[in-house]
Amino acid sequence: MSQTTKDRVQHLREELNRHNRLYYVEAAPEITDREFDRMMQELIELETAHPELQSPESPSQKVGGAPISGFTQVQHRVPMLSIDNVFEPEGIVEFDQRVRQLLGRDTVDYTLEYKIDGVALAVIYKNGHLTQAVTRGDGRTGDDVTHNARTIRGIPLTLDGKKFPERLEVRGEAYIANSDFAVLRAEQEQSGSTVHANPRNSTAGALKLLDPVQCLRRKVRFVTHGMGEIIGVRYETHMDYLKAVRGFGLPTTPGIRVCRGLEEVQQQVEVMMDSLHELDLEIDGLVIKVNYLASRDEMGVTSKSPRWVVAYKWERYESSTQVESIDVQVGKTGTLTPVANLTPVEIAGTTVSRSSLHNRDEVERLGIAVGDWVIVEKAGKIIPHVLRVELEKRTGDETPFVFPEECPECQTPVVQDEGGVYVRCPNPDCPARLRETLRFFASRQAMDIDGLGIKLIEQLIGAGLVSSLVDLYDLSGKRDELLSLERLGEKSVDKLLEGIETSKAQPVWRLLTGLNIRHVGTSNAQVLVDHFHSMEKIREASLEELANVEEIGPVIATSVHEFFHSDYGLALIENLAQRGLKMAEAETSSDSGSQQLEGKTIVVTGSLQRYTRDEIKELIREHGGKASGSVSSRTDYVVAGENAGSKLDKAQQLNIPVLSEDEFHEMLFG
């Protein structure tokens, strides 16, 4: 045997381990599966030809060994307890109250992570070497499935680095990705074997197979989300532990984040639920954990579950339907969004006929084609999304979907965000962008122009009466041309022109919202105007000054700065100012009599009668207060309308003053 052969074997092992880590831990693969398989095959051939080079820690050992005769029962040193579940947002509030009461603190740091619908597994390393993998079982005793765990590429045979614990028991979830499950079902259908119902059942079955080669073929994956017994190292927080585990070469639950207190948890719950479509795995909830491990020890466990963790779960509903066509919509910022038109199907009491496919990357991940049968999921109250394609139902008559290289509306070559997933039309004069921009500009979120709906917007564009936001304010001189439009009588024209004229006096933050600046919505616009008071001062602000405004940050600041220093943005602001739109707000002082709420944080909840939600929030800001979305110990008042729910309950528990609409009105106006 030559030194060259030995070096080649070592090189292949190092490269295969590196690529495994890039794929499963970093989610940044450098080579294709085919290239990986070629490297693995070369390693196996070299080790077969040179038995003296074989090693139980070689990545070649992950291709499966000999079948076993049966399973051995193993007792968990630390019980794998179940987690308490809540099914409504109020349950999260109650969990936070219990935690703070037990710890005697006003605010607690939590981690928030996706709850993967897989099979719980404990994987044990001694001095960096994989020694055992055990299923949860009844929580105290499980099955030894080490022979199968060795085939899971997300479970390294040896840990990276040198500072790993003497004994490390990582706990996590074994699962099969939706894309891999779709291929598995197609193969099962083709071979005439039983077609599995869902990824979780297929994963559970794979781990209980006696032949590890069969488990390997199902492409089971693994992510870490917890810990069992650890000897030799102590971690301060859950996030410290997960960071260390990733450094050892083990993948962790995607998208995990730290939240400071209940308010941040509630905000991030919505964000994470809206991002479910980005994940290639099945999720049935979110898990909220106390971040500091010493606090967990202080809280302890019950006979069934730890007191420091809760799962916010939702019902998952899914159904099979067919893709009839795929459209591409162009949004107000030029984003191209593919949308699947589906054969109507009822899911959770509603008829679903369309589902966003979000972006080009999502289309490629799904591998979706027109004519495909797909599984559409609706988790809780979330908008339905396509979970996977039913490859086993393909007939060959499907039409592949090709993402357009040009804008479908104006034929301008599209561009992809640098470092992002969204593809955009860069043409600011694109008819589709104009249509969506006008619709948003006229909406209640922005300028609230009565009488200007999408049908009329399309008519105005089609007739050549409007080709920009500025043109709206020139329509008063085109009354006869407006009257000539189909189904637009004098009353409708008067209503439209009055709405446009009235909008000139709208607060500056509404105008800033409606200008269609990327990343700037209602809340950010209000923050900017409250700080700078005028369009001119926003334009004069440096990038650093914008970024230093509370709640703005560098991403929004860059977008605002670029808009206000672009030829398009400067011309738009100037033309709107010439037509009489409000460009500045008075800088009121505390002794002006209009700052009764200065420094006060107010939460509005329930159904209101006297004000709309936007109107009352605007009043709060006009009188020096801050309108917040959640109740905390820093809240000064809660304004409660009819059917006020958990926010009212929390206010009462915290002894925060609660006002009716009338009481709030009287506070301001006497």
Image (tube, helix red, strand yellow):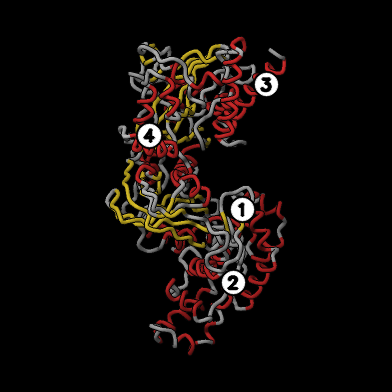
Residue flagged by tag 1: what amino acid is it? Asp
Instruction: Establish if 147 lies above or below 255.
Output: above
Say whether marks 4 and 1 touch (CB < 8 Å).
no
Q: Report the residue at 70% width, 53% height from top.
A: 545
How far apart marks 2 and 3 lie (CA) works out to 72 Å
Q: Which of these two is toward me, 314 or 528?
A: 314
Q: Earlier in the sequence, mark 2 or mark 3?
A: 3
- Front of the two marks 2 and 1: 1
Determine which residue is flagged by label 2: 582
How far apart marks 2 and 1 lie (CA) works out to 33 Å
How far apart marks 1 and 3 lie (CA) works out to 40 Å
Q: Which of these two is toward me, 275 or 652?
A: 275
Determine which residue is flagged by label 4: 199
How far apart marks 4 and 2 lie (CA) works out to 57 Å
Task: Tell me the quarter of the picture where residue 616 sits.
Answer: bottom left
Determine which residue is flagged by label 3: 8
- Front of the two marks 2 and 3: 3
Residue flagged by tag 2: what amino acid is it? Lys
Quadrant for the C terminus in the image: bottom left
Q: Tag on residue 417?
A: 1
Say whether marks 1 and 3 touch (CB < 8 Å).
no
Residue 395 image position (x, y, % from top left)? 36, 48
Say whether marks 4 and 2 touch (CB < 8 Å).
no
Figure label count: 4
Q: Is residue 430 left or right of residue 188?
A: right
Q: Which of these two is toward me, 545 or 206?
A: 206
The secondary element bearing badge 1 is classed as loop
Q: Report the residue at 45% width, 74% height from top.
A: 452
